[in-house]
Image (tube, rainbow, N blue to C red):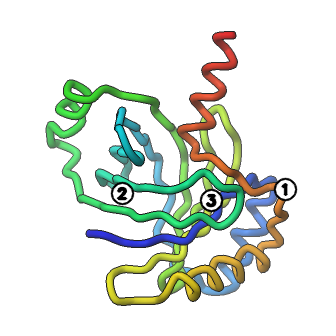
Amino acid sequence: MKQINIEIKAKSENTEKIRNVLNSLSADYRGKDHQIDIYYQTKNGRLKLRKGNIENKLIYYNRENTKGLKRSEVLLMDNNQDSNLEKILESSIGIKVVVDKKREIYFINNVRFHIDEVKELGNFIEIEAIRKEGEKSDEELTKQCTYYKDLFQIKDEDLIKYSYSDMILEKENAKLE
């Protein structure tokens, strides 16, 4: 399945406030998932295998590293936890980095919210306005994402430019220096 996301990621020291706002809006709470994202070596974009209790998917996406709204083109494939996909990918293209996180997942219509606690990095909020084929325009997705950013009072200085995988790699490289 192919989809387009307009998204932001931000540091969050006030996850309880965001959780309360989501609950006041009757957001659809899907649960708390312990996710291991295994990123693989690629020539273009990013390829990760997500292993969790709620979500198990192979995810390929292209996204620029920008410190505000980001547009991603995403391809998703459901994965059975018992498959050999992880072994095949590791053997054939190699692991780049592993991200370990606890994620609360909420939805309001086509907008997904993640309250993340990422091992070695801290707490974050992600807002993803999602378009599947034939649905909303990029402009509509941008408005949705901006609306929730403002509602949660996310400051521009808290926005994150990079993915968790980039941040962990940067941290690991700093330890080596």
Q: Which residue is mark 2?
A: 55
Instruction: First in sequence, mark 3 or 2: give its number.
Output: 2
**Image-quadrant location for residue 51:** top left
Residue 157's mark? 1
Horizontal and vertical percent for residue 6? 55, 71
Up/down of 133 relative to 105, above or below: below
Is residue 152 something that shows in the picture?
yes
User: Which image quarter is the N terminus in?
Assistant: bottom left
Q: Could you tell me the amino acid type at mark 1? A: Glu
Q: Could you tell me the amino acid type at mark 2? A: Glu
User: Which image quarter is the C terminus in?
Assistant: top right
Mark 2 neighbour class, 10 Å CA radius: few under 14, some 14 to 19, many 20 or more: few
Q: Which residue is mark 3?
A: 115
Q: Gap in Å between the C-alphas at discs 3 and 2?
A: 15 Å
Q: Gap in Å between the C-alphas at discs 1 and 3?
A: 18 Å
- The residue under the point 22% across, 52% down is 79
Answer left or right for 152 relative to 55.
right
- State yes or no: discs 2 and 1 in contact (Cβ < 8 Å): no
Up/down of 48 relative to 68, above or below: above
58 vs 116, nearest the viewer: 58
21 vs 94, nearest the viewer: 94
Q: Could you tell me the amino acid type at mark 3? A: Ile
Is residue 51 something that shows in the picture?
no
- The residue under the point 79% across, 68% down is 17
Secondary-structure class at tag 1: helix
Horizontal and vertical percent for residue 95? 36, 28
- State yes or no: discs 3 and 2 in contact (Cβ < 8 Å): no
